[in-house]
């Protein structure tokens, strides 16, 4: 006989743990399905946008996360293909970096302490829609729940099992991300650097006193060349361990596709990593998805339309900078042009950065 829950969540990244915490703290029976044993690695730049802190305060995890080993970031450095650098100071205490391994582990511990049931170690493999909710299975567990939140990231299994993911474009290799933690080079202390490469870009940020996070984003056919360029530039050992992630770009999926089913974080929408906002969007959309799930559980017929509107509004005021960043890194001549413009009009890069690191997202109207 499978276990019965009010809410089942697939994925224990920031979107999944934020929704699990929010629902469990309101007294609902929550199951969290996670394929990886924690702590686990996640391909990410490890930078926390200041917008995360109000969300983490409301989830009650801000103090534990602030106490983690981290690096403060006080400068953004943008570097053109020709190596010309533009530096933008960040407001004091605005941005910090912390490894995702430790960030996600703290969030999961808080969810468990709030009473969430974790089903971990095997991926979700089957979903069935039932009259009163959802039945879900992994190789080791079966459970049923009245509501479902898909928070299983950019390659969302839930999205695929529900038939929401459009077929891949034939012959389109897209872009790939590679990431590693390397010994900290002194020139990157306190700095998050974004440097254009011949076939992509790299993002560098210190994560503690001795290590830096190095992310490479490359056109897939040029991955080997991009990696060689990075090894030369950062003098990495030939046996440097890299983690990879693909595809980087993916169409958006509907955030509330079926009654009692909500998609949060990367499962619904992926943003360009360049601006380091994905964790913020994941946490906030996870929190909103939990609110929508609770509305559904309490019989509110407008739960889906609430979430669709809230999700739209979450991205509305910020996404244009992210899209501009994507254009700048996929059309490198535009990126170089914007950097040159920034040298003549120093207020421009500061203005764009202030849009990215602003903490305010208006609350959706009910
Ligand atoms: C190269 C790169 C650099 C980035 N840098 C930054 C940055 O500096 N700052 C920032 O804010 N964002 C950054 N991002 C974006 C950020 O990593 C994501 O937006 C964020 O992790 C999304 O969180 P999520 O909870 O939606 O998904 P994830 O963090 O991907 O979590 C999904 C979880 O679901 C689990 N899962 C997947 N499939 C299944 C299954 N079938 N069954 C059970 N569990 C499953 C996974 O194991 C994982 O734990 C970057 C992204 C990339 C690619």
Image (cartoon, grey):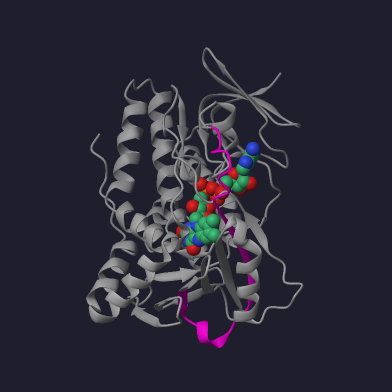
- Residue 191 forms part of the magenta stretch: yes
- The answer to whether residue 356 is above or below residue 306 is below
Image location (x, y in percent) of residue 220 = 59, 56
Q: Position of residue 197 (x, y in %)?
A: 51, 71
Query: Which residue range is magenta in the image?
Result: 167-193
Q: Is residue 198 visible?
A: yes
Residue nearest the viewer, comparing 68 with 355: 355
Q: Is residue 244 left or right of residue 303?
A: right
Left or right of residue 35: residue 250: left
- Quadrant location of residue 159? top right
Q: Quadrant of the N terminus?
A: top right
Q: Is residue 210 visible?
A: no
Image side of residue 290 versus residue 318, left or right: right
- 188 in relation to 167, above or below: below
Closer-to-camera residue (35/339): 339
Q: Position of residue 108 (x, y in %)?
A: 59, 50
Count of numbered tags:
0
Q: Position of residue 318 (x, y in %)?
A: 30, 54
Question: Residue at horizontal 41%, vertical 83%?
Answer: 84
Residue visible at 34% across and 64% down?
A: 357
Rendered residue at 45%/49% (across/down): 283
- Report the residue that reaches farthest toward the front: 171
Q: Is residue 64 magenta?
A: no
Q: Is residue 239 above or below residue 303?
A: below
Location of residue 90 with respect to 254 vertically, above or below:
below
Farthest residue to the top: give it.
131
The quadrant of the picture occupied by the C terminus is top left
Q: Nearer the viewer, residue 249 or 278?
A: 249
Specify the quadrant of the image occupied by residue 32.
top right
């Amino acid at each position: 006989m499978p276990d019965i829950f009010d809410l089942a969540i697939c994925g224990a990244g920031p979107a999944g743990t934020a929704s699990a915490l929010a629902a469990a703290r309101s007294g609902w029976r929550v199951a969290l399905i996670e394929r990886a044993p924690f702590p686990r690695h996640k391909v990410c730049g490890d930078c926390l946008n200041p917008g995360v802190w109000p969300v983490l305060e409301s989830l009650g995890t801000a103090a534990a996360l602030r106490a983690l080993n981290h690096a403060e970031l006080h400068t953004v450095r943008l570097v053109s293909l020709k190596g010309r650098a533009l530096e933008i100071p960040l407001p004091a205490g605005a941005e910090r970096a912390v490894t995702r391994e430790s960030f996600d582990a703290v969030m999961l511990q808080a969810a468990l302490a709030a009473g969430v049931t974790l089903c971990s170690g095997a991926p979700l493999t089957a979903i069935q829609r039932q009259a009163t909710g959802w039945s879900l299975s992994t190789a080791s567990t079966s459970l049923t729940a009245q509501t479902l939140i898909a928070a299983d990231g950019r390659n969302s299994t839930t999205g695929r099992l529900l038939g929401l993911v459009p077929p891949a474009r034939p012959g389109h290799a897209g872009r790939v991300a590679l990431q590693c933690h390397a010994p900290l080079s002194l020139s990157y202390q306190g700095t998050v650097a974004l440097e254009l490469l011949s076939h992509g870009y790299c993002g560098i940020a210190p994560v503690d006193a001795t290590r830096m996070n190095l992310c490479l984003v490359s056109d897939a056919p040029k991955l080997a060349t991009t990696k060689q360029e990075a090894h030369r530039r950062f003098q990495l050992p030939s046996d440097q361990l890299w983690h990879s992630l693909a595809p980087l770009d993916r169409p958006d999926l509907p955030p509330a596709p079926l009654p009692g089913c909500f998609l949060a974080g990367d499962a619904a929408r992926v943003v360009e990593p360049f601006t380091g906002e994905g964790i913020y969007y994941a946490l906030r959309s996870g929190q909103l998805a939990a609110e929508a799930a609770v509305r559904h559980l309490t019989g509110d017929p407008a739960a889906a339309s609430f979430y669709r509107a809230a999700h739209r509004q979450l991205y509305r005021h910020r996404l244009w900078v992210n899209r501009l960043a994507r254009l700048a890194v996929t059309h490198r001549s535009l990126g170089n042009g914007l950097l040159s413009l920034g040298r003549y009009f120093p207020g421009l890069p500061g203005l764009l950065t202030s849009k990215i690191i602003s903490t305010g997202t208006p609350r959706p109207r009910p």
